Amino acid sequence: MQVSFIETISLVKRLYDQSMLPACTAFSITRMELDILVFLANNPQHRTATDIIEHRRLTKSHVSSALKVLAEKELVIKYYEKDNRKTVYLKLTAKAAPIIACGRDCQKQFTETVFSHFSIQEKEQFAKLSSKLIQNIQLSLTGGNTHAV
């Protein structure tokens, strides 16, 4: 049975959603809240809501609502830097550490499941092809040329 590329994307998303559910359930948080915590932990160079919106392709209103809840739960601190009173920066608190660890474990299990029957060479080939896919997608989204050279 041949599965289309679109079906593959849908299946991967469904499995990822399912894989992250134990962390959400264990800590009584939404997927959006978990995604934000794990994103901030995995990408310390990105410290603003705008970074989250741009890099995770999430909607501004959803990110804003989730950050409000995370701040209320004392999992994230919002602050301003000395010279910049316009941009709100985000900092994870120690209270977020067990949630992040659980989220990362879920991500690791997801990755192990997806690549469980891949050889090292197949994983390397997949990484190369994924890189090309990402390049093509990013070029297309920014109006660039998507034709391979």
Image (cartoon, helix red, strand yellow):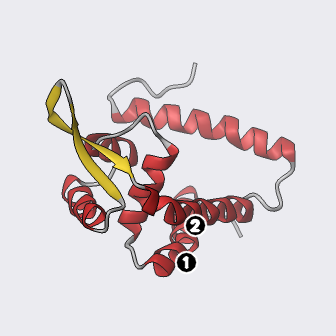
Amino acid under disc 2? Cys
In the rendered structure, are the residues bearing label 1 and label 2 in contact, judged by CB atoms less than 8 Å apart?
Answer: yes
Residue 19, image x, y percentages: 58, 71
Residue 5, image x, y percentages: 57, 56
Amino acid under disc 1? Pro
The residue at the point 39 percent across, 37 percent down is 46
Q: CA distance from mark 1 to mark 2?
A: 8 Å
Is 44 on the left-hand or right-hand side of 103? left
Is 115 on the left-hand or right-hand side of 22? right
The residue at the point 31 percent across, 45 percent down is 90
Disc 2 target residue? 102
Above or below, 148 relative to 131: above
Above or below, 115 relative to 122: below
- As drawn, the label of residue 109 is none
- As drawn, the label of residue 22 is 1
Residue 8, image x, y percentages: 58, 61
Between 20 and 105, the residue placed more toward the observer is 105
Give SS at disc 2.
Answer: helix
Quarter of the image for residue 65 reads bottom left
Could you classify mark 2 by the number of other residues whose Cα lies within 10 Å: few (under 14), some (14-19), or many (20 or more)?
Answer: some
Closer to viewer: mark 1 or mark 2? 2
Which quadrant, please, contains the C terminus? top right
Residue 117, image x, y percentages: 83, 61
